[in-house]
Image: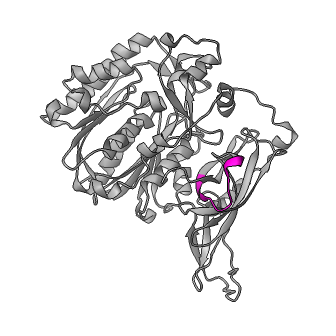
Amino acid sequence: MTGITSYGAYIPLYRINRMTIWGALGWLNPASLLPGEKAVANYDEDALTMAVAASVDCLTGMDRDRIDAVYLATTTPPYRERQNAGIVSAALDLRPDARTADFTGSTKAGLGALISAADAVKSGSAKNVLVCSGDCRLGKPGGYLEEIYGDGGAALLLGDSGVIATVEGTYSVSYDFVDHWRADEDKYNRTWEDRWIRDEGYGRFISESITGLMTKYGLTPKDIAKVAYPCHYIRAHTDIGTKMGFTPAQLQDHMFTAIGHTGTAYPLMILVGALEGAKAGDKIIVASYGNGSDAVLLQVTPEIEKVRDRRGIKKHLAAKKDLGSYEKYATYRRMLNVDTGGRGDEIAPTQISTLWRDRRMVLGLVGCKCRRCGTAQYPAQEICVKPGCGAIREMEPYRFSHRRGTLFSYTGDLLAFSLSPPAIYGFVDFEGGGRWLFDLIDCELEALQVGMPMETSFRRKYYDQARGIFGYFWKATPIRCQ
């Protein structure tokens, strides 16, 4: 039995109301605006960090040594030539023999990666495959796409034991339908005529894949508990479903007014939302959109009750803050050329050779634990620091990235450059031992308190523009949702 064994999601803390976007341009006619808000990645977040965050949620309580492969789906990878899935694998501290692959080039790549993962498990070439996705796309300032695009990530674990939703079948259609695109030298996405995309694109391809799937497996709309698919045209989203014979109650919430269109992650995030409310026996159809459409038929099993502790969609939706200003949004997305000052220009990037030698320490946040007394240390040392122990070379690797802690001390720095001043640093005491100094993120200085619960988050540390290298490390943040 092949199917989904766990799920996870990530939505950035910050949201921006669409009225705030248009208000910055002086266009305040509510009749011409899309409703709601969209999710905004922080200045140190990107597609890769959001995929890692979703994966951490997905792998809650699981043995990471059981993961045989990682498939990353994104249209906005930080690197064009350096495997991005390999960075995700390193951040999660997975086995070095785990297969890694990038899926990109279309917003349907997320569901395509899921189908490929299911095929790998079904064929026996892998037992557990992690499919993760994230996107952080840009529309031109003041344009329609800027209003549409939101940021987020999702992750699904595919396997053959402990399955919470079996993969019962798939159906795909592929067309070179050019509705939106981004060439290699483009910073912003481009788009074609809006009504044509709605009617000829979404209205045709999603219906074709879903009806094709139901015909292939002899199903009718009444057999399906939920049907999940992306569409940023709110009225068209309902029309697509009703024309296929589904009732409004069968349509999974599109979440567009809450998070926006999150690219490759969008159909997977909607699927996670459907799984959160699913019960044993439910049949779910999830479909993607982008140069055609993929559709997958799932059937929920009683094992679904064992993964109710994930943060998923609901908890992330509830834990949010309003960004407040369009100028801050434009700064976070590097659409404004901000003067970093002298201190901001002083970058001490990690040397590539050093990163290779210390990759588990830097990317995986792996320290050590004394076999003799159990003392945890970061970074890893050869000698135990506990007084009275002094064990030498009796350490074993110890992963800190998924462990929570408390804030031991902190400070705000108004001299150091930060895109979200002041720069905040603090020592975190980990549960089970260990202490380290982290940048503190997704928080305000006035709200911090010594002893408050903290957790780590994989983020961008710097961008070395001269060498074209993104530096990643773990930062600390107040625990956002339980």
**Which corner quadrant of the image does residue 295 belong to?**
top left
Q: Residue furthest right?
A: 342
Here the colouring is one colour
Image position of 236 with respect to 4: above or below? above
Establish if 433 lies above or below 104. Answer: below
| Position of the N terminus by quadrant | bottom left
Left or right, residue 351 beside residue 186: right
Give the residue furthest to the left.
218
Q: Nearer the viewer, residue 342 or 454?
A: 454
Vertical order, 344 against 393 (above or below): above
Q: Residue at x 36, y 41 (%)?
A: 273
* Side of 165 relative to 265 (left or right): left
- Residue at 69%, 74% (x, y): give it: 381
The image quadrant that residue 189 belongs to is top right
Task: Based on the picture, tell me whether residue 201 belongs to the magenta stretch.
Answer: no
- Inspect this view and state whether residue 330 appears: yes
Q: Tell whether position 447 is magenta.
A: yes
Q: Position of residue 388 (x, y in %)?
A: 69, 89
Give residue 279's position: percent from left, percent from top.
24, 48
For residue 83, say whether it is visible: no
- Residue that appears at 61% across and 67% down: 430
Q: Which residue of the protein is positioned furthest toward the bottom in this rendering? A: 388
Residue range corresponding to the magenta coloring = 446-457
Q: Relative to residue 307, is residue 264 drawn left or right?
A: right
Tally of marks: 0
Nearer to me, 66 or 21 = 21
In the visual, does 264 lie left or right of 227? right
- Residue 64 coordinates in the image, percent (x, y): 45, 62
